[in-house]
Amino acid sequence: MENRNPQLQRAIKVLGARQRQQIQAVRPQATKLVDKTFYLNVRVDGMSGINQLVDSNTKKLVGVTNFDGNLLNSGRDVVIDSIRSLFTSDGTSVENANWQNSERIPAQLQNADLRLIQTNDMLIDLPMTDTQNFKQEDHRPIATTPLLRAKEEFKLELEFPKGVTVAVGKALFMRLEFRVTEAKK
């Protein structure tokens, strides 16, 4: 098990700065930190161009995603400390995809870009090849500790190079995982 103390210390600093920015209520509430993983499973065969992976219609569904729309609930700021992607063609739907048989990043996705954007701020902008298979760890550390703010819409998008389409015919699934520290008020 990896030691996540450095990520926790960075998250505390970022969240503390965020809390100091906000106007304090008459009775300040204690903030509770929660270690969490946000995840999203999507079927990617047939995708091309720019794809919004999360939008206002995204509903939390166990085994598919724990995102509930494209904004976080009030009082729940999140600091992202790492990301990883998994791919598999083993399964018939996102609900039963076999992530234990995870595959290397498919050729059509190797040059795609993953972006997380909130209020015109680019929080994450990575090529997909940078989200998988690095050294000993499954998760890629995010050194900038991006803060995803509550009650503000965000976009999670996957952009393919012009003219590239993920082949149709055999199901291909992608799982994105974001390790986060959530501040609950």
Image (cartoon, helix red, strand yellow):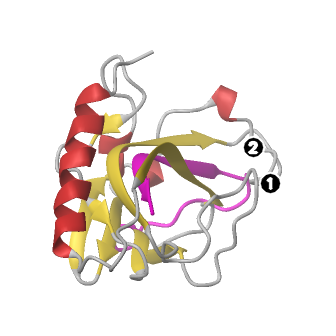
Local crowd size for mark 1, using a 10 Å CA cut-off: few (<14), some (14–19), many (≥20):
some
Residue 4 locus on image (x, y percent): 33, 27
Taking the image as drawn, is residue 176 in sight? Answer: no
Instruction: Give the side of residue 49 with respect to residue 170, left or right.
Output: left
- Which part of the image, by quadrant, shows the C terminus? bottom left
Residue 67, position as x, y percentages in the image: 59, 65
The answer to whether residue 155 is visible is yes
Q: CA distance from mark 1 to mark 2?
A: 6 Å
Q: Is residue 161 magenta?
A: yes
Look at the image and say whether residue 162 sits in the magenta stretch. yes
Q: Residues within 10 Å of mark 2 (few under 14, many from 20)?
A: many
Q: Along the line of sight, which residue is nearer the eye, 105 or 165?
A: 105
- From the image, tell me which residue sits under label 1: 93
Q: Of the residues shown, which amino acid type is indicated by label 1?
A: Ser
- Name the residue rendered at 28%, 62% in the picture: 147
Dot 1 and dot 2 residues touching (CB under 8 Å): yes
**For the magenta stretch, what is the residue range?**
158-185
Q: Quadrant of residue 91?
A: top right
Q: Quadrant of the N terminus?
A: top left
Image disc number at residue 97: 2
What residue is rendered at 83% in x and 50% in y? Answer: 92
The amino acid type of the residue labelled 2 equals Ala
Viewer-proximal residue, 57 or 16?
A: 16
Compared to 56, does 41 lie above or below?
Answer: above
Question: Looking at the image, which is closer to me, 4 or 50?
Answer: 4
| SS of the residue under disc 2 | loop
